[in-house]
Amino acid sequence: MTNILKTEGLSRYFGAVVAAEDINVTITDGEIVGVIGSNGAGKTTFINMVTGYLPPSSGVINFDGQPIGSLGPRKLMRRGLARSFQIPQLFLELSVLDNLAIALSAAEGRQLNMIRPVRTPERISAADEILEQMNITQYRDEMVTAMPQGARKLLDIAIAMLGEPKMLLLDEPTSGVSTDEKYNLMDTVMEMVRRRGLTVLFVEHDMEIVRRYVTRVLAFASGVVIKDGAVDEVLADDQVQELVTGKRHQPQTEQGDA
Amino acid sequence: MLTIWAILIDGLIYASWLFLVAAGLTVIYGVMRILNMAHGSLYALGAYASASSIGWYYASGGDQLWIAFALLAGCAIVIGAIAGFIMERGILRLMYGRDEVLMLIVTFALLLILEDLMKLVWGTTPYFAYQPYAALGRFNFGVLSVSGYQIMVVGVSVVVGAILWFWLERTRTGKILRSIIHDREVSEAMGVNVRRMFTMTFVIGAGLGAIAGGFTAPIISVVPGIGVEVIVVAFAVVVTGGLGSITGAAIGALIVGLARAASIHTMPQLELFIIYAVMAAVLIFRPNGLFGQATARKI
Amino acid sequence: MGHSLQPKSWQRTLLGTATSLAIASTGIVGFAGSASAQEATFKVGLVTFLSGGASGPFGVPAAQAAETVIKAINEGTLPAPYNTKGVNGLQLESVVIDEAGGPTKQVEEYRNLVQRQNVDAVIGYISSGDCLAVSPVAEELKTFTIAFDCGTPRLFPELESPKYFFRTGLDATADNVGAAHYLKETHPDITRVAGIQQNYAWGQDSWNDFRLSMKQLMPDAEFVDNQTPQIFQGSYGTEISALQTSRPQIVHSSMWGGDMEAFVAQANVRGLLDQATAVLTTGESGFARFKDQAPDGTIIGGRGPFGAFMPDNDLSEWFSKAYEAQHGVPPSYPSSKMAQALLALKYAADNSGAKGKPSNEQLASTLKSATFESVSGTVRMALAGGHQALQPMFYGEYHYSPETGPELRNIRSYAGACVSPPDGYDAQEWIKNGFPEADCN
Amino acid sequence: MMRLQKTEMLLVVAALALGLSSLISPDWLVFTSTLAIAAALVVMGVVMLMRAGLVSFGQGLFYCIGGYAVGLGGRFLGVTDALALVGMGIVATVALAMVLGLLLTRYREIFFAMLTLAFSMILYGVLVKSHGLGSTDGFGVVNWSILGYQPDPGHESATGLWLAIVLALAAALFLNRYFQSSIGLACEAIRENEVRVEYMGISRRQVLYINYVIAAALGSIGGSLTALTAGHVDPTMAYWTISGEFVFIALLGGTGHVAAPFIAAFIFILVRTYAVELFPNSWQLILGVVLLLIILFLPKGIWSLFTQKRRAEA
């Protein structure tokens, strides 16, 4: 079992605001790790740094054995680091099929073609297959705007999984999804994850989901990892209960990385 | 040495004029995210209003300078505000939420319309209201001379700038406006009546454009097309300084003004594109202008 | 861009647009139909600026002059020799087109006039660019065309063997050669000369011609500065200080219209015109409006014997009266030049010897090298192989008093042969070589 | 796929129809059509940029270079073959666009618009200053031939129209494919959401760069055709109001389909011609009102009238 992701002294400040401080995390291949913490605890900041969207103020990130240095999301994606988003990042004015078609075409990793149609038979069937697995086929030719939140989340995650990533970061996959959809959604996602044998790191507010799907948990509070360990142990921790699973909330600092 | 003084003086004078022209543009953009191409037409409108009113006043035997100035400023502001109100309520209102650049085109259409409307109202013969300009005489520094009126314009633009700054930074309305500038959704959520603020902002911005025209009228001869000439220059200033920032507009105006004065005194042949060169140069090093903030999408 | 609309509204719009398109298309057909069959009348296209900065000082006065003259032509109320109704008996009908939009658009509009509107002749063009672009088309379409104002000396040199294209005015060379002559006679001992020109071809050509002429006529004069503000800039504060720092005695300017008037007013207030005398090659167009803004002694020209420089004769007398009666102001030079072009058309038509409507060929051959009476006196089409007028150039000093109003003093005229290069000479070469074949007495 | 083929066939048919109509239609209409097609080519470029979410207020830059390439090539290099002249324009334009593109692909929205405007205004300034090229008056274009065939006087316009049609058809067929292609779609994706595009592993700047350069080339072709047809070039081609006109036409047609720019250009030029003629004093007003109505009722342009139905089925 090798480390796939390793951060050392990872910190990020927005002016005086501490968004993340001295985060040292090691994720080994095949792990499914949950990240919990109240709003502004630094979860998304952490993911943004790891995926190269947000340069750290200090610290080192190693992915798959090499430091990511100043690589951006694009280069990291090519190295096998994919992510989904808290707010699904989709092409709203394009059809669902086109969203997948462009993603598939990008995932092939070749120079984009300017004459051959993006909707090749192969890509169409591949897209249909994905829509099948996510059972959102009915939206195939709709614009994304026509899809409910849950379906958008699924599509967002599906797109993240294209291009054979080694590791997948899910940013609050169930936020904004109705409680009855949640579990189907997570089941579908986890099914696909298992089939691909991905390492997953996912941010989650819903402790039920966390209990159910992860083996290990990182608890964030005001930018610091206050606890890192097995699910039950972490969720049982008083500090965690006070700062995270409790009702206490801190002001939004995530404006910063916006 | 002489030239350097000349450059500084002329640069300052031109900069203050630029600021007058650009202020309304940047206020409107800052709050409403509309780059108002019709701003030039509002400027022309103000110029026509003040030129014709002053012309009428002197023609009917008036000779009180202060009345002339009262007329000049008054007519310009009033007509500008009215036009602004009509434009905002009549047309822009129907377009809110549309793409930023589409709004640019909408105001481009307004520009075309206003240009012809003004022609229908005022005809095409030049209006010439030189009396106030002549009345303030000049100050001589050796061979150099500065017209009193130009100095007054400098004063006017300083005052306008100060008022704007106070209004935005020190008043309650200003606070609300800044909240809108910072994040429209949130302030809407916090129950700010954004639409009313928009109307107010646009009317004020339009008024500013008209004032600029009003105070320029006595210097120039007011003819069709003067509006179109100032738009791009004003744009350049505002973009250089950073869209939506009063300070930016002021600094941008100074930079452009001095650069232009310098080129006219030293190498006149560059004058035609010095403004664009400055803008391009600034944008290359500060992609959002000197005081502009980058806005990235939240994820 | 934008966002989708509700089906209802777009269906409505669909209908709306469809119908409007239908109307438009029928409109086209309608026009195509009505365009032909214009026998009883002679249809002339008038192209002049109706929008933009050139409309006020030039375009509209010219259009108003056309209105006045065409009315008189059709009523036969012009003085002799034009006291017959219409042109060669045909009522004159005019189509007015805005010259704004640049040469490409003007070429398009010209073709529309000739090929769709079926005009029998075209009179117009203030912008040199438009003249240069339209003249070859006129020749290609074999349509009798008179340029009434545009001043570029390149016009005929670039149009080899013109047949249908005429210019009833002088080109810019004459303005500036004339100005130099006037300075030599009236200000023999000046040494420091500066200039301020709008930054485009007209300004650049004018300054070149003036500079070269001065080198010939007043070799001691030194050129201390030339400012080139953008056209329609309006405010010239910086340029004026730049000029002041170079301490000129003469400031030559080919600026026209609002720009010229604004510059004069500003330079006057700033004291530049106390230090230096302005020479305004197009100053006449501001004659009626300067009031006390132009200091006495300011030297102004009218691009020939036009406007205030019109000689006293029946035609000019009639024209000044009729124009002022109808439009409230005395005619400025663009008005006179338009009148002259229309008179040239009437002359060509009346003397074409044609039965009914004269052909383009008849009109062209009649006007070629012709001599006709005009508001500016007797005009000889003696340049460019008979396609351009040869006329004297006038300059004078502007004086104003509230009582008597504006007046011209110390007017001097220079024979056409003195200020215009003979055929076969490039204008600038002609000046550089010391005005060969010029006849200045 | 099927629809694609159909579009292409329709384009070819339309082109042939237009070309043949030139045999019967009056000369002014032939001339106007040629100018409309030339404008449409430039507008295609504007549309390409719009699909990527960028509005250029400086497409006149390339339009002007195309025009001047024709003028200068004929005048100073003695080139008279129309295709060669157009080609020179394209080469010059692409060279410049490849430099500017490096910078411009970093900018969006207003800043892109203003920078493009600035660059074309700088060219305008340079041309106005270049006295040898006639400054603002510009200069005439020499009589041109095409592949050795010298159109005899009076028939230039017909030949010009055919040339325009051929070039425009080629461009349209290419763009039709391009819009369906990976890069074409990537452009729309960038307009919609750049963050996702980056996370997909697509280089935004590379895509925008390619898109920008192609758009520039189209602008140049349009300029060259205009110069060949009108027989005159002058700096106004680079003035910002001209670029504004192209944006105007682009909005009029909408970004929905390659045919839209052509329809829009025809409508625009006809509306303007009749407005200028019927209301010589207020034609700008009419254009303004038309533009407002379009934006108000057809935010996706005239083409949206045709597409509403297809969207539903597709």
Image (spheres, coloured by chain):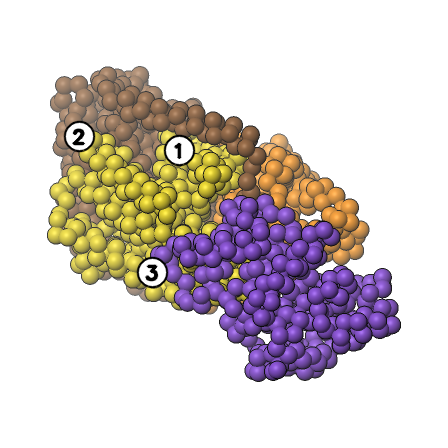
Chain colours: A purple, B orange, C brown, D yellow
Callout 3: 10 Å neighbours few (<14), some, many (20+)?
A: many
Q: Which mark is residue D93?
A: 3
Q: Regarding mark 3 in the picture, which secondary structure is present there?
A: helix
Q: Secondary structure at mark 2?
A: helix
Front residue of A169 and B240: A169
Residue B95 found in image quarter: top right
The image position of residue B214, as x and y in percent, is 61, 44
Q: Position of residue D266 (x, y in %)?
A: 35, 37
Residue at image location 20% in from the left, 40% down from the top: D158
Considering only order in the chain, which callout, 3 or 1, is on the residue closer to the N terminus? Answer: 3
Give yes or no for contact between labels 1 and 3 (Cβ–Cβ under 8 Å): no
Q: Between marks 1 and 3, how big is the CA–CA gap? A: 31 Å
> What chain does badge 1 belong to?
D
Callout 3: residue from which chain?
Answer: D
Front residue of B6 and C132 = C132
Do we see residue B151 in this rendering? no
Q: Which residue is mark 1?
A: D271
Could you tell me the amino acid type at mark 2?
Asn
Q: Residues within 10 Å of mark 2 (few under 14, many from 20)?
A: some
Q: CA distance from mark 2 to mark 3?
A: 43 Å
Distance between mark 1 and mark 2 Cα atoms: 30 Å
User: Residue at the location (19% across, 43% down)?
Assistant: D159
